[in-house]
Amino acid sequence: MARQISMPYQFPPVCLLPPAADAGGRTSAYRDLANALKAWVVCHVNQGNAAQVTLSILQGQDTLGTGSKAVGVMPTWLCAATATSDTLAVQTPGATFQTSATVADKIVVFEITPEMCLDLVNGFHTIAVQTSASNAANITEAELFLWESYQGASAPSTLV
């Protein structure tokens, strides 16, 4: 029996930050969650230096980031050393997460339920991820996975 689920149709990945050295920190483009029932920002930190990295999820009123501010509290998970574990451990919910100083490859997952985390009443429906300044030996990347109210071969774009 076939399983009626397909990642590209039901949880299409969207690149927020391509892999890059993160000495100065960076902010992704803002992506529209207007059609999202839920979204997950998956951050990968290849921490080659003990300088901590703070990951922040921001919300904006459009894809330009108008009125940018922190999102509300959301569930967060961490895999602190992907070389030895694939287990995601629940972390304290928040709008940001700071890695430890431990040199390791890490994954941080933020779960966004728009009506709980975004200021929808005031028109905030886009998100971005921001990394803090750390060290050039720290490589970061981030992907957005969406569970959209519309599912099909050509889902609405997050760029508009």
Image: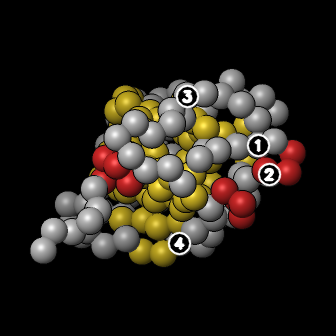
For marks 3 and 4, the one nearer the N-term is 4
- With respect to residue 57, does 38 lie above or below? below
| Disc marking residue 4 | none
Real-space Cα distance between discs 2 and 4? Answer: 23 Å
Badge 1: how crowded within 10 Å, few (<14), some, or many (20+)? many
- Viewer-nearest residue: 132 or 30: 30
Look at discs 3 and 4 and give the one toward the viewer. 3
For label 4, the SS is: loop
Q: Position of residue 25 (x, y in %)?
A: 54, 31
User: Which residue in the rendered view is the most extreme toward the left?
Assistant: 1
For label 1, the SS is: loop
Q: Is residue 128 visible?
A: yes
Q: Position of residue 11 (x, y in %)?
A: 39, 52
For marks 1 and 4, the one nearer the N-term is 4
**Are the residues tagged 3 and 4 within 8 Å (C-beta)?**
no
* Residue picked out by circle 3: 159
* Residue picked out by circle 4: 91
Q: Quadrant of the C terminus?
A: top right
Question: Amino acid under label 4?
Answer: Gln
Look at discs 1 and 4 and give the one toward the viewer. 1
Residue drawn 62% across and 61% down?
A: 113
For marks 2 and 1, the one nearer the N-term is 2
| Disc marking residue 124 | 1
Question: Amino acid under label 1?
Answer: Phe
| Disc marking residue 119 | 2
